Image (cartoon, helix red, strand yellow):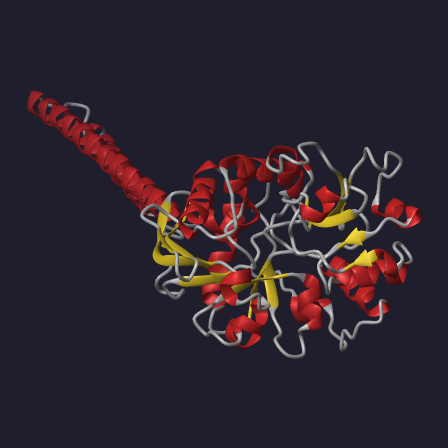
Amino acid sequence: MNRSLLLRMLSLLFASALVAAACGDSSDTDTSTDDDSEESSGDEETSEDEAMEDDAMEDDAMEDDAMEDDAMEEGAHSDLSAVCPSPLVVQTDWFPEAEHGMLYELIGEGYTVDTDNLITSGPMVSEGVELGIDFEVRAGGPAIGFAPVSSYMYTDDSIHLGYQNTEAQVLAFGDTPMISVMAPLEKNPQMIMWDSETYPDITSIADLGTEGVVINVFGGGVFAEVFAAQGLISADQFDPSYDGSPARFISEGGAIAQQGFASAEPYNYENVFEEWAKPVSYQLLHDAGFEVYAATIAVRPDAKADLDACLAEVVPIMQTAVVTYTSSPDRANAIIVDAVEQIASFWVYDDGLAAFSVAAQKELGLVGNGPDSTVGNIDLDRVQAVIDQISEAGLDTAGVTAEDIVTNEYIDDSIGL
């Protein structure tokens, strides 16, 4: 029973007993003496004093309960050391960037950057409260020899969680299966861009197909196979020689279209690449019909049971971090920019690009709630539709279903943007 309620009941019972006793004394005889009156008066004063003491005790008890409730609420996630490893390690797919902002939101003060191994680590926090363990974010791409995150996680048991995307999960499931437990991004930031001055009548990826425009892409992109199979783009329009450099697009004056990220390239082409210095037009792959989830948080199936209690606590914390970062990204962006500066590789990232990325994420719906009012959950029907598209493109999906690669069991439905 609630301690305040118990004290309140005892107080009322005690006060009632005193009142009953006082009433009994006054009705024993019709001829009360002066001494009886003085005694009765003394009893009433004593009763009032005791009632005041009881009220004070009740107020103290209520205050104690309120303090305990506040402490429980504040400390609900204040110590993960009993359920999570320390450090809790997440392997990303690239250098620090604002698309990974949720992770850097979870790194507290006193963080360090290992410039040899491209690792940013520090105390894990949620809304400024330390959680009792350390948190480690590892860069991907060049840092891991451009190996897929899933295969790298199967060679390094110190990694607990890793970034995944739907198509990679499907095609690598037979060798390196992964289960996504949360999606920080609602839409894939990847897009195809073109120069609107060169192609003023083109407004979509489908229009690029109709006009026969060459599209420079990274080799091995599943979306190219899917769009070709759908007849959206002719297979021979895809040139898989893209290396991430702006050189060809600029040198050809925008005569070709090009793969990129809507949360980065539009800023760079307008503000950083002086040889271009003007806007580009683009459409998201998502909006063209290939609705994969990019950069999900995933776990190896054989490690899931051991991390179950940790995931039950950490996934809602990550959902909260998405909300916090989206509304107030400056602190995490400062960590991202600082980490990139310390790493001092070819990857360059400044405050302007970080701010642009967050604005683009919100404007384009790259970050947002799922099909309901919850952030971070994954639509299994959408995942299954992607699997079907990949299969229809002639790629081997080996009977994989959405339930094999996705779970929402750790999602807190009450957390949303």
The answer to whether residue 371 is seen in the rendering is: no
Camera-nearest residue between 108 and 320: 108
Specify the farthest residue to the left: 35
Looking at the image, residue 400 sits to the left or right of residue 88; the answer is right
Camera-nearest residue between 289 and 370: 289
Looking at the image, residue 223 sits to the left or right of residue 91; the answer is right
The answer to whether residue 152 is seen in the rendering is: yes
Q: Residue at x 72, y 67 (%)?
A: 402
Q: Quadrant of the C terminus?
A: top right
Q: Residue at x 53, y 36 (%)?
A: 327
Q: Residue at x 76, y 57 (%)?
A: 382
Looking at the image, residue 9 sits to the left or right of residue 96; the answer is left
Expressed as whole percent of the image width and height from the top left, the position of residue 60 reads 25, 37
Query: Image quadrant of residue 27?
Result: top left
Camera-nearest residue between 203 and 251: 251
Camera-nearest residue between 402 and 140: 140
Looking at the image, residue 346 sits to the left or right of residue 253; the answer is left
Q: Residue at x 92, y 46 (%)?
A: 211
Expressed as whole percent of the image width and height from the top left, the position of residue 378 reads 66, 56
**Does residue 191 lie above or below 350 as drawn?**
below
Specify the farthest residue to the front: 251
Query: Image quadrant of residue 39?
Result: top left
**Does residue 3 lie above or below 40 as drawn?**
below
Expressed as whole percent of the image width and height from the top left, the position of residue 170 reads 71, 69
Expressed as whole percent of the image width and height from the top left, the position of residue 395 reads 80, 72
